[in-house]
């Protein structure tokens, strides 16, 4: 077993102007900026006595702000030191000597990768002159002297990183912090940070190993890739009995690998004091008070105070100006959740389209809040809201003026709509009577009548709801998805798909409310395919949008019920119409189970206000983590749940509720594509690694693997033919994501065994207490609303925090 030891040296450019040190000599008390490359040495060796040296106040104050924000401790004074490493000779117009001053130590930053929280401590902070940096262009490495002689802050972390993803997260968080502190602005933003990564792989529990330096990584993405590539390279060497040499290497993006640059040897001292010693006074570093709320604190506050998801709060707070805009809009009266959603969606799209920052838009927070408030009040539709954003982005008008002048206001109040509704019912008595009898077909005709009377300004959803209320419509829709509950027995005794209408007698439960049966799929449960889910989702959406559904019942087979139930939970857990799934292991004529289960489902659909439920054998079970015990007992139960969960206010469901009239053929295509790029693997002793590797080969099209492990996330990570390691390594190379569940009833957190720690280090994501069925459903639900692979990954990883 190997243990990685990784630390970073991060160089932060503090100014694009050269000059770090100021000398106070005996020449009339004047203070001179020392910039010439030999100046410091000349002053040090000349007859002029250098009484003291200071760091330029602007440089020192910037460094101190970052140190204090990270909880570090500033030094009172420090000696000027010089790098012991050989420095390349700069051109004559570039001035530096390689001086370095340790200004602070300690401090930390918290990160979390795949649910594993970690504190990244900082060992030291140094202010230095930039000595240029190595870069690569045209296939060759060369020095870039653009910022040589300019002040930089060098941070060295402790060796606590285990994978490249952790380093990438740390750098992203550090960049955000610096942006909040206004340490990087304008031209500095693109050149503000560079990084050296130091990587060693050792035999656990040994801690000594050859350290490989990965030089001058100028992209967070490159840092992640380079570290992971180097870990793989070192492991391959150690596995074959070789020795890893201490050296410097360069990341070659085109080859997705590193190449040797120079030998490093053993270096015990990196800095040495000047002779004679020169001390820098650091007591003028400025007040310890911070004038800005830091990103982590702001994320936590916004998430807590405004009810945002962790993912949404991260997006809002990634840029200070965006977080300021969000809070300003909320303070103007708009609701937090739709405000965050529309900032992340339509407003961000417009900004990218025009190449603007959020501070450059004509859509002020006040105008944005006005649009969101009108949308929330039902005065405008979502389509009109998008048109308003586009219009105001171009003209700078107020939303109220545009809506008034263009007559874009929807009629959505009872006072505005009831006169037209009354006339519609009076002039169409047969349609009204049909509605009272439970026939929903005339509803669209009556709604169309109202739309015509109001010149198309009526909100059709509100119209349908008011008609329903006016004539006391209360319909429960029964959507049939096949299964034993609607099956038929063939002459040879086997079961086959039957007639959905066969359950109509079972709907007579003594309650006087209309029940409408809608066949969706006629099959047995084991025949369920992604396109069948698309049909079911479309039917549910249609019934909800019609405004006629008091509740929805889904009859299903038992075999795949855990998948369908979880899928509906992720998509409809926040909907205002309850959905109840039910099933039976027996044909209706073979016992009372089918009738009792359907009766409970209908009752629940009638009485509940919202949520997704499973009605079975007298119980209401959660649609999540549903496990079928067996046909003999005929029971389901929920794994890993202290109490059943029926509602879900997370990002997936909230987003999907904003999707109107989704096309079932489009959804079928999306779900089919998702199915073709995902596999589920159940681990067992003797599962050959080579077989697993073939499943995710580059030409396989697989990008997601749901991996069912043992216990809390354990598996064989030995160097053998039956190890998971080759699969995970191949996954890294092919950008495959692994989402891990357990075969047992326990939570996967990778915390208990060394083997599970290795699985985590190779990039697998623990899915907590979710079962394989619930994670599979989560993947399909996420696929329906994700535009990118990154968005899908975020939804997958953050959903478990919401339930």
Image: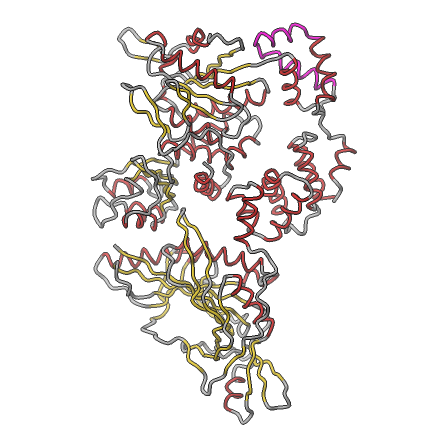
Q: Residue 477: x and y, percent? A: 51, 16
Please give the name of the residue rendered at 21% of the width and 45% of the height, measured from the top-left corner. Answer: 721
Give the residues in magenta.
427-453
- Quadrant in the rendering for residue 233: bottom left
Residue 750, compared with residue 562, is above or below; it is below
Left or right of residue 760, residue 99 in this image? right
**Residue 517 or residue 786, whichever sits in front:** 517
Left or right of residue 712, residue 445 in this image? right
Question: Quadrant of the image for the C terminus?
Answer: top left
Q: Residue 326: x and y, percent? A: 62, 46
Please give the name of the residue rendered at 54% of the width and 34% of the height, measured from the top-left corner. Answer: 654
Residue 215, compared with residue 312, is above or below; it is below
Q: Residue furthest right?
A: 405
- Quadrant in the rendering for residue 9: bottom left
**Residue 613 or residue 101, whichever sits in front:** 613
Please give the name of the residue rendered at 41% of the width and 26% of the height, measured from the top-left corner. Answer: 564
């Amino acid at each position: 077993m190997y243990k990685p030891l990784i630390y970073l040296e991060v160089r932060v450019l503090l100014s694009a102007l050269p000059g770090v040190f100021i000398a106070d000599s005996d020449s009339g008390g004047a203070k001179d900026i020392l910039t010439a490359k030999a100046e410091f040495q000349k002053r040090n060796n000349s007859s002029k006595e250098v009484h003291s040296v200071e760091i330029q106040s602007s440089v020192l104050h910037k460094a101190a702000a970052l140190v204090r924000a990270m909880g570090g401790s500033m030094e009172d004074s420090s000696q000027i030191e010089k790098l012991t490493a050989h420095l390349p000779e700069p051109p004559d117009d570039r001035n530096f000597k390689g001086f370095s001053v340790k200004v602070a130590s300690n401090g930390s930053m918290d990160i979390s990768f795949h649910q594993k929280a970690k504190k990244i401590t900082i060992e030291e902070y140094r202010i230095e002159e930039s000595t240029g940096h190595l870069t690569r262009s045209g296939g060759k490495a060369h020095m870039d002297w653009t910022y040589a002689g300019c002040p930089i802050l060098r941070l060295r972390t402790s060796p606590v990183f285990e994978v490249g993803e952790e380093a990438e997260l740390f750098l992203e968080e550090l960049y955000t912090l610096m942006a909040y502190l206004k340490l990087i602005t304008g031209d500095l933003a693109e050149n503000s940070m560079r990084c050296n990564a130091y990587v060693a792989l050792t035999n656990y529990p040994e801690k000594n190993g050859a350290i490989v330096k990965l030089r001058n990584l100028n992209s967070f993405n490159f840092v992640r890739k380079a570290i992971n590539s180097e870990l793989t390279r070192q492991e391959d060497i150690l596995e074959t009995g070789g020795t890893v040499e201490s050296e410097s290497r360069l990341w070659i993006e085109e080859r997705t690998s590193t190449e040797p640059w120079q030998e490093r040897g053993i270096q015990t001292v990196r800095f040495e004091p000047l002779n004679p010693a020169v001390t820098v006074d650091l007591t003028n570093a400025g007040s310890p008070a911070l004038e800005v709320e830091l990103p982590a604190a702001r994320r936590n506050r916004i998430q807590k105070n405004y009810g945002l998801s962790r993912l949404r709060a991260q997006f809002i707070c990634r840029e200070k100006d965006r977080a300021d805009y969000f809070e300003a809009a909320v303070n103007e009266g708009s609701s937090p959740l739709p405000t965050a959603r529309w900032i992340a969606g339509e407003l961000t799209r417009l900004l990218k389209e025009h190449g603007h920052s959020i501070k450059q838009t004509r859509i002020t927070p006040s105008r944005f809040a006005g649009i969101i408030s009108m949308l929330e009040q039902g005065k405008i539709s979502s389509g009109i809201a998008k048109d308003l954003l586009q219009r105001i982005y171009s003209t700078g008008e107020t939303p109220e003026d545009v809506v008034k002048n263009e007559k874009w206001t929807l009629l959505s109040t009872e006072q505005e709509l009831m006169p037209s509704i009354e006339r519609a019912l009076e002039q169409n008595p047969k349609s009204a009577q049909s509605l009272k009898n439970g026939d929903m077909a005339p509803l669209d005709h009556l709604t169309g009548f109202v739309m015509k009377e109001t010149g198309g300004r009526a909100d059709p959803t509100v119209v349908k709801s008011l008609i329903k209320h006016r004539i006391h419509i209360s319909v429960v829709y029964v959507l049939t998805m096949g299964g034993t509950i609607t099956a038929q027995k063939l002459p040879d005794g086997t079961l086959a798909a039957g007639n959905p209408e066969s359950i109509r007698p079972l709907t007579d439960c003594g309650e006087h409310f209309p029940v409408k049966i809608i066949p969706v799929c006629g099959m047995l449960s084991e025949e369920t395919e992604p396109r069948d889910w698309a049909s079911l989702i479309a039917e549910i959406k249609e019934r909800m949008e019609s405004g006629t559904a008091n509740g929805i019942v889904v009859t299903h087979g038992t075999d795949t019920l855990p998948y369908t139930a979880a899928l509906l939970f992720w998509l409809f857990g926040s909907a205002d119409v309850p959905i109840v799934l039910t099933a039976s292991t027996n044909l209706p004529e073979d016992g009372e189970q089918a009738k009792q289960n359907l009766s409970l489902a209908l009752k629940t659909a009638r009485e509940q206000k919202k949520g997704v439920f499973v009605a079975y054998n007298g119980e209401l079970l959660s649609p999540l983590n549903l496990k079928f015990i067996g046909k003999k007992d005929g029971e389901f139960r929920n794994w890993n749940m202290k109490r059943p969960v029926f509602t879900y206010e997370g990002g997936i469901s909230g987003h999907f509720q904003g999707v109107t009239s989704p096309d079932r053929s489009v959804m079928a295509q999306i779900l089919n594509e998702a199915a073709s790029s995902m596999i589920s693997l159940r681990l067992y002793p003797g599962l050959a690694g080579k077989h697993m590797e073939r499943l995710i080969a580059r030409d396989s099209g697989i990008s997601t693997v749901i991996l069912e492990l043992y216990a809390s996330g354990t598996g064989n990570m030995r160097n053998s033919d039956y190890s998971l390691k080759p699969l995970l390594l191949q996954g890294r190379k092919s950008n495959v994501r692994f989402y891990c569940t357990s075969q047992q009833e326990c939570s996967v957190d990778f915390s208990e065994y060394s083997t599970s720690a290795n699985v985590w280090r190779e990039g697998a994501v623990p899915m907590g207490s979710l079962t394989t069925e619930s994670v599979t459903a989560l993947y399909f639900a996420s696929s329906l609303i994700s535009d990118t692979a990154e968005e899908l990954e975020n939804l997958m990883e953050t959903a478990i925090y919401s339930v």
